[in-house]
Amino acid sequence: MVADALVYHPALAHYLRFVATTVDSAINPYNAIKKQFGTTRKILRIGKFVEHLKAAALAADNKSPIDPVLRYLAIGRQLGYAGYLTLDTITVVDVIGVKKLAAAKRLQESAYRSWMAGLACSAVAGVYTLWRLQEKEKTLDRKEGEGVVEAKKLEKERAAARIQLISDLCDLTVPISALGLASLDDGIVGIAGTISSLIGVWAQWRKTA
C-alpha cells in the first residue's frame, strides 16, 4: 500500500525539514511539525523489524540459483534494517515520554549505524548489479530477435537498479549526517530525503496501480 510506503519514505517530513532551513525558525511551526512527524513515524514502525528478519531468513534459505554476492548483500541489507527498526522501537518510550532512557542517545546512534550498514549493502548491490548487467549486455547479439528482446529486458533492469541506487545514496545522507560523519546541513539532507521518499512512493504506487 502507498500509505505503508510513507512509513519508510516520509516525503512530507523531509520536505518540512528542508523548508525549516529556509525560514526563520523562531516564527514558524515547521520544526514542531517536523518533530511530530518523526514521533508518529517511530510509532508506526513498531514491529516492522520482524518483516526484515523474515526477509533476511528467506534470503539466506533461498535455494534458487542466485549470485552469492547479491545473496549476502541482501541478507546484510535486511539485517541492517531490522537492527535499525529494533533499536528505533526501543527509543519510542523515551520519545513519547513514557520512560526516559539514559541510553536513548546511544541507542539512536546505534540505530543509525545499523540503517547505514543496511543502506550501504543495498548501494553496493546496486553498483554490482549495474556492472553485471553491463557485462551481460556485451555478450548479446542485437542482430537477432532474442538479442533485441533480452537487451530491452536488461535496460529495464538497469533502470530499476539505477533508481534504487539513487534512492539509497539519498537515504545515506540521513545517518551520515546524524552520526556526524559528514557536515551536511538540514537543507541538503531534507532535499535528498524528499527525493528518496518520492522515489519510494512512486515505486509503491506502480506496484498497486
Image (spheres, grey):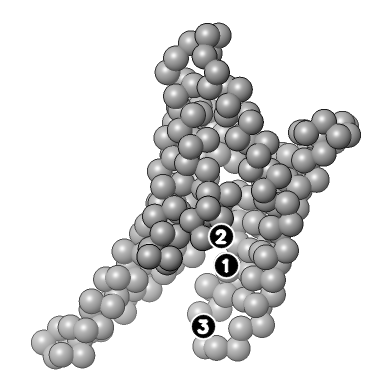
- Of the image marks 1 and 2, the number of the one nearer the N terminus: 1
Residue closest to the eye, 106 or 7? 7
Residue 114 location, x and y as percent? Answer: 67, 51
**Residue 55 appears in view:** yes
Q: Residue shown at 47%/20% (left/top)?
A: 21
Q: Check contact, mark 1 vs mark 2: CB within 8 A.
A: yes
Q: Which residue is mark 3?
A: 66
187 shown above or below 165: above
Q: Which residue is mark 1?
A: 73
Farthest left residue in view: 143
Q: Residue shown at 23%/78% (left/top)?
A: 151
Disc marking residue 152? none
**Residue 165 appears in view:** no
Indicate the amino acid at tag 3: Ile
**Marks 3/1: CA–CA distance:** 12 Å
Residue 119 location, x and y as percent? Answer: 55, 54
Residue 56 location, x and y as percent? Answer: 66, 70
Indicate the amino acid at tag 2: Cys
Residue closest to the eye, 19 or 169? 19
Indicate the amino acid at tag 1: Leu
Q: Residue shown at 69%/71% (left/top)?
A: 54
Q: Which residue is mark 2?
A: 121
